[in-house]
Image (cartoon, grey):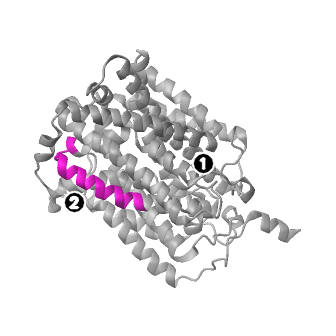
Amino acid sequence: MVESRSIDYIPDAERHGSLFSQFTLWLSANLQITAIVTGALAVVLGGDVFWSLVALVIGQIIGGTVMALHGAQGPQLGLPQMISSRVQFGVYGAMIPIVLVCLMYVGFSASGSVLAGQAVAQLFNVDDAVGIVIFAAVIVLLTIFGYRSIHFVGRIASVVGVAAFVFMFAQLFAHHDVGALLANRHFTLASFLLSMSLSASWQIAFGPYVADYSRYLPRSTSSVRTFLAVGLGSVIGAQAAMTFGVFAAALAGSQFSHHEVSYIVGLGATGAVAALLYFSIAFGKVTVTTLNAYGSFMSMATIVSGFRGQRTISTRHRLLYILGMVGVSTLVALAGRHSFLKEFSAFILFLLAFFTPWSAINLVDYYCFTKSRYDVPALSNPDGRYGRWNGMAIAIYVAGVLVQMPFISTSFYTGPLVDALGGTDISWILGLVVPAVLYYACARNASRTIPERLILPVEQGKARS
């Protein structure tokens, strides 16, 4: 029941699972309240319904493609996503993006806990703070059990989520004039690109841990089919949730902020049905928040193991990492629960600037150069093939972050060129394209040795014996 592996390679004898479980995991991770709120932001921040929906779809496809390309690496490598970054950045250098990944886990876990806590509080008639703490306790328990439990909960949550969203959409269409909302169109480029950024950033933010949940699949699993299972589950789930959020925000107006959960449930449910919807909202957050907690301890273990040269971590350290990261995110949720919506929109958009360059570098290296030909033992050896620091990759990563700064538009930072573009934020596009081009050009001319095939730890042991 309790997973014994962590950041280490998954041997073929322990591989299991199916592509359907990948689809249900990512469907359930997206059929949830935070995705609804993210879609609602497209309208809350000035967009209309029709063009917001179009832009969200385009952003989902672009971001979902990036995310699913990361997910397809899991079965081929049998490694957590951020461990594999040592190939590009070096054993120590990979800690730079990993630290930022940990901040992402805290932020997303905190924002999700606020909304789930609201649902738990309504369900049990307690204060929101108590609801957040109850939710955090459930997350700790599931994260301790690990990979199998996460996929099991994902299958159940996908059924619960589909049923809840079918009901909510039915109520929405039955009691409101959706056609009138779609007919009110006022296209602006800034709002359109903002909506694209919301959905693209939502998907790309899964990139640092998506392979963590496909790494147990048999190595013979098709990369294309893995890509489709992961990508379709994530894109379909997110678009359905964000579409509902767009309609909800358009109907609610100023009533939406700070009352997101109660307003959504109140669109068409009272009494026992409302209680079931509150349960489905809280349960829908379980999957993705557990993913964040699980990924957080993997990232912390990756940082520590890089300095210690370890390939595994103890059960006690695993528990400490889980309690620490969930504890921090819970404190953030408790402190920021009264001003959630504004801070979350700024967080998700600004965070994108630090993950698009990492995604670009990782994907270009994997699909254009290394192609799963990794030296797994060398990933734990600072004096080995990949070294301590890869100055080229780190420099390109920093350049990829800096090139975005003049074009970022958030509530706490606005780049100097945003006004010249009519308030349009195009930073994430540059963050993908510029590092990808730079890395491809530099890596093609770099002198480095790439193994002829995947080198596994067991092979190294046999060679010594």
User: Is residue 404 among the parts visible in the rendering?
Assistant: no
Q: Position of residue 3 (x, y in %)?
A: 69, 42
Q: CA distance from mark 1 to mark 2?
A: 37 Å
The amino acid beneath tag 1 is Met
Highlighted range, magenta: 43-65
Report the side of 176 relative to 77 (left or right).
Answer: left
Q: Residue furthest right?
A: 465
Q: Is residue 52 magenta?
A: yes
Above or below, 352 relative to 121: below
Task: Decide which of 16, 113 is in the foreground and name it.
Answer: 16
User: Residue beneath label 1, please?
Assistant: 298
User: Residue beneath label 2, please?
Assistant: 416
In which quadrant of the rendered view does residue 45 lie? top left
The amino acid beneath tag 2 is Pro
Q: What secondary structure is the stretch in magenta mostly built from?
A: helix
- Which residue is located at x 73 percent, y 43 percent? 314
Looking at the figure, which quarter contains the C terminus? bottom right
Above or below, 443 relative to 239: below
Q: Position of residue 124 (x, y in %)?
A: 44, 16
Q: Answer few, some or many: residues within 10 Å of disc 1's Cα (few below 14, many 20 plus, some between 14 and 19).
A: many
Report the side of 438 relative to 214 (left or right).
Answer: left
Q: Is residue 167 magenta?
A: no
